[in-house]
Amino acid sequence: MCKIWLEEQKDATADSLKSVAKRDSITPLMTDCQFSIMMQITAVAETSSTTGYGACDTLDDGQGISAGYIQFTSCHGSLQKVYKSYCDQNSNDLCTSDYESAISAAQGYGDCGSSNSGKNQAPGLDGFCDAWKKQASEDTDAFAKAQFLVAKAGYFDTITDSVSKYHVTTALGIAQMFDTAIQMGPGTVDTLADRTNQNVGNLGDDGVSEADWIKQYVYERKLEQINWGGAYVGTTARLQPFEELIAANDLNFDHNDVTITLYGSSYTLVAKC
């Protein structure tokens, strides 16, 4: 059991990714139950777990250290935001001046901005992942809080304009945009949506269903993953849950639980709300 802290509901306690059952306590765009399942789909894609707060490694994807339940990276600075959010309030083996300097310098280190393969750990971070995992196990509540707030502000809040611009109304459509922002950056969302519009038309036009629109968006994303090359080519399988839910016409997670397949494993995700 752990606690997820929400910006407006900081005393809400329960299982991972749980929030109070009020439609707009997190966002007016979707219910808290839908938001919970959305987060879990991405978390499973990133860490094979819905509670992988302690996940931390230097992966073979050129992005430096990847850590946390949605794999914040040192290359692009999201890991630094989680670190600052947590360490501004704590003092321990993770929150040291040496690690603070090293993790700050890791943003943009090496060729992380141009390569999608190879290990790319910046100097001064030996032992960082061990300290990260230790604090995740000893201080789960605070770790969950820091990671949730950065995920929401740094990724979900950045796609809200796109959700409105492209007239996306279903939980699955929003979840696909969120997952894109996490894996490929918020700027990629509009690029893929524009290509989708070119191929199937705009949502809101006669004859354009949201199921067909999402299906085309997923296809455009798969092409972009292959085009980016490197480690991204092997991640096209993370789109399988979205394809399955489209085929089942479960665009709003109607039963507050979904069963998905990712990388050959099956997961039943139950909304925490």
Image (cartoon, rainbow, N blue to C red):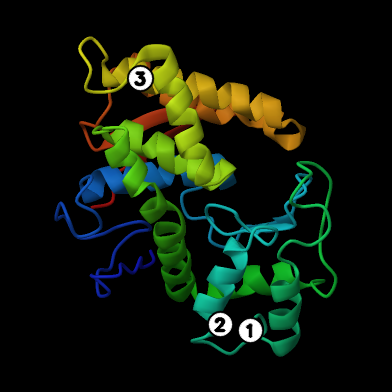
Residue drawn at x 38%, y 13% as measured from the top left: 200
Is residue 264 rendered to the left or right of residue 260? right
**The disc labelled 1 sits on which kind of residue?**
Cys
CB atoms at circles 2 and 1 under 8 Å apart? yes
**The disc labelled 3 sits on which kind of residue?**
Trp
User: Element under label 1?
Assistant: loop
Toward which corner of the image does residue 209 lie, by quadrant? top left
Residue drawn at x 68%, y 87% as measured from the top left: 96
Residue 167 is situated, as x and y percent measured from the top left of the image, at 26, 32
Residue drawn at x 34%, y 38% as measured from the top left: 174
Residue 249 is situated, as x and y percent measured from the top left of the image, at 28, 18
Question: Which of the pair 113/26 is nearer the observer?
Answer: 113
Toward which corner of the image does residue 248 lie, by quadrant? top left
Residue 255 is situated, as x and y percent measured from the top left of the image, at 21, 32
- Decide: few, some or many residues near mark 2? Use Cα within 10 Å; few <14, some 14-19, many ≥20: some
Per the image, the residue denoted by label 2 is 87
User: Element under label 2?
Assistant: helix
Is residue 89 in view? Answer: yes
- Decide: few, some or many residues near mark 3? Use Cα within 10 Å; few <14, some 14-19, many ≥20: many
Is the residue 166 above or below the residue 80 in the image?
above
Mark on residue 213?
Answer: 3
Residue 65 is situated, as x and y percent measured from the top left of the image, at 72, 59
Q: Earlier in the sequence, mark 2 or mark 3?
A: 2
Question: Which of the pair 139/164 is nearer the observer?
Answer: 164
Mark on residue 95?
Answer: 1
Q: Residue furthest top?
A: 207
Give the Cα separation between the discs numbered 2 and 3. 42 Å
Q: Earlier in the sequence, mark 2 or mark 1?
A: 2
Is residue 195 rendered to the left or right of residue 92? left
In front of the other: label 2 or label 3?
3
Is residue 79 rendered to the left or right of residue 57? left
